[in-house]
Image (cartoon, helix red, strand yellow):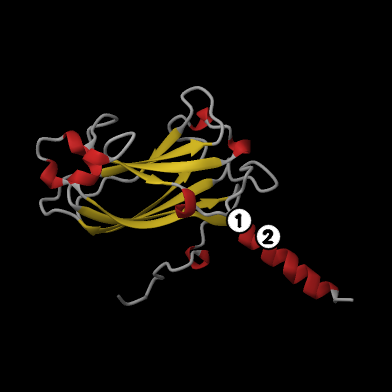
Amino acid sequence: MRPLSFLFLIMVTAISHAEQFVLFDVTFPFTKADADNATPSKSHYYVKGPMLNAQRPKDWTAPVDYRNGTVHVRLEIIEKPTGGEPTIWNVCYIPNKGQGHGYGCIATDVYKEKGVYEKDLDMTKFWQNNDIVWSEGIKEMHLVIKDNSGGNGHAHKRPDHEKFFPTKIRMTLIQVSKGAKYDPKQVPNLPQAGDRK
């Protein structure tokens, strides 16, 4: 029979790992041709199938509540045209079951240069978050490159599209449960503070 201290350690470890999970971690180049030829929608990069964490929960409300938690967005701009054109990515949750418009989107911060941009967002406060049936889980994610003019500012539509393309980014989304705090040390393959490149 195992000692109670051992069993307690196992329980604590399981709980700590349940506090967050990586939904996806993708690195990709994106050209004007990629944006023009994306289907079914232009300027979209589709994260689905094996690009999504296969261990993501089927139910985001229980037994661990991710629906009322936060999402940590880590955006690393590896390549970007010079000139400092303000750019943003919409990041849309596509559920297995939707209602209303059937999906919801968060947004990265506006950026002008290469670098790493991070932010935490409340899962109950982003655009159309209530149009997702969270107990049914997430099917795929759509990443949309835009200018900073608002909803219809898709980068491929711009006459000066060379200010946006080609680009290369790494985007990592970490879902954090209600009441928990994002811990970068739990994210695999993530540069930690103090790491040298």
Disc 2 and disc 1: Cα gap in Å? 7 Å
Where is residue 58 drawn, in percent x and y? 62, 44
State left or right for residue 73 relative to residue 2: left
State left or right for residue 89 relative to residue 97: left
For the point 19% across and 38% down, which residue is it?
156
Residue most extreme to the right? 1
For the point 64% across and 62% down, which residue is it?
16
State left or right for residue 125 relative to residue 85: right
* The N terminus - image quarter: bottom right
Where is residue 59 drawn, in percent x and y? 64, 42
State left or right for residue 137 relative to residue 41: right
Given residues 181 and 32, the one toward you in this image is: 32
For the point 45% across and 53% down, which residue is it?
51
Residues at circles 2 and 1 in contact by the CB criterion of under 8 Å: yes
Q: Which mark is residue 33?
A: none
Q: Which mark is residue 19?
A: 1
Given residues 30 and 111, the one toward you in this image is: 30
Task: Identify the element where label 2 is drawn.
Answer: helix
Residue of label 2: 15
